[in-house]
């Protein structure tokens, strides 16, 4: 009987210890974000698709990255709005600079393989990105801090595909929202070297003035 009682006490102790761990974990997960969130935006147009698409459709995606003590705990919320988009199939993030096509790194919405029946004209959805959102291509296992850095470097874009435009109807480079440019400048980590800066847009040569 003495042994049984000891064993019981031991089990109670184990249960108490385990539940403390669970509670501690939950409290930690719930801990408040630190610092100012980083806002990023992608303005979606047909003109940015490579090659360009002539469409009256347009849209935008707004991201807010909430920072935690450890970068790996960072999470982002996003809102997708699309206008005049027919037969929507999927909305993804890809990695590449403007005028280049790159690998898909995350799915933001979809897929809807047969395309949405109704035209989308307004806010489509809100969603959440966590570290495990980047499970594909060159961003595999990368976190949201890496997403911010690559976006600041102009190396991240959103692509909207439809039944009629499987290679993209709309595209937009993800950029830091103006109001968070200063907080994003404080993001630690290696900054892109001068070699990685995209070449400036080629300027058309000045037309020679016709002689008289
Ligand atoms: C960042 O975006 C969130 C969500 O849209 C907004 O509430 C907040 O005001 C934005 N932050 C700044 C500094 O504009
Ligand atoms: C785009 O489409 C509109 C409407 O069909 C047309 O008027 C316009 O010329 C087109 N623009 C280009 C650059 O093809
Ligand atoms: C789509 O939304 C825009 C902006 O709210 C509006 O001006 C336009 O009339 C709408 N188009 C349709 C087809 O509902």
Image: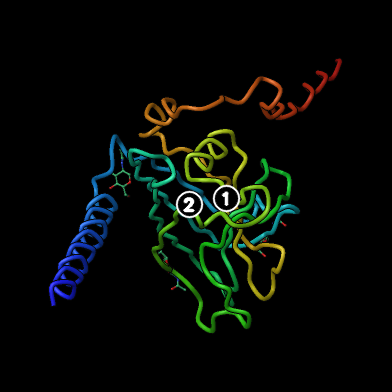
| Quadrant of residue 98 within the rendered picture | top right
Identify the image's colour scheme: rainbow, by chain, secondary structure or one colour: rainbow
Structural crowding at the residue carrying mark 2, measured as other residues with C-alpha within 10 Å and reported as few (<14), some (14–19) or many (≥20): many
Q: Is residue 33 left or right of residue 151?
A: left
112 or 116: nearer the eye? 112
According to the image, label 1 marks what residue? 141
Tell me the CA gap for discs 2 and 1: 7 Å
Q: Residue at x 64, y 63 (%)?
A: 169
Residue 207: % across, % down? 80, 23
| Quadrant of residue 173 within the rendered picture | top right
209 or 129: nearer the eye? 129
Q: Residue at x 25, y 62 (%)?
A: 18
Q: Is residue 120 left or right of residue 93?
A: left
State the mark number for residue 131. Answer: 2
Secondary structure beneath label 2: helix
Can you tell me whether the CB of the residue at mark 2 lies under 8 Å from the nearest atom of ligand 1?
no
Q: Is residue 95 left or right of residue 84?
A: right
């Amino acid at each position: 009987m003495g042994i049984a009682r000891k064993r019981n006490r031991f089990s109670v102790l184990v249960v108490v210890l385990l539940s403390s761990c669970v509670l501690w974990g939950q409290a930690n997960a719930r801990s408040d974000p630190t610092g100012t969130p980083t806002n990023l935006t992608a303005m979606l147009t047909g003109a940015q698709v490579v090659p360009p698409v002539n469409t009256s459709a347009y849209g935008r995606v707004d991201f807010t990255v909430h920072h935690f003590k450890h970068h790996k705990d960072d999470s982002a919320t996003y809102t997708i709005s699309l206008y005049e988009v027919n037969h929507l199939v999927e909305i993804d993030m890809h990695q590449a600079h403007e005028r280049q096509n790159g690998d898909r790194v995350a799915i933001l919405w979809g897929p809807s393989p047969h395309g949405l029946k109704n035209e989308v004209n307004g806010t489509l959805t809100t969603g959440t990105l966590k570290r495990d959102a980047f499970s594909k291509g060159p961003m595999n296992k990368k976190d949201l801090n890496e997403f911010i850095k690559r976006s600041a470097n102009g190396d991240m874009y959103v692509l909207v595909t439809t039944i009629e435009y499987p290679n993209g109807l709309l595209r937009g480079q993800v950029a830091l929202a103006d109001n968070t440019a200063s907080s994003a400048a404080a993001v630690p980590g290696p900054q892109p070297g001068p070699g990685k800066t995209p070449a400036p847009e080629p300027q058309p040569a000045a037309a020679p003035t016709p002689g008289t």
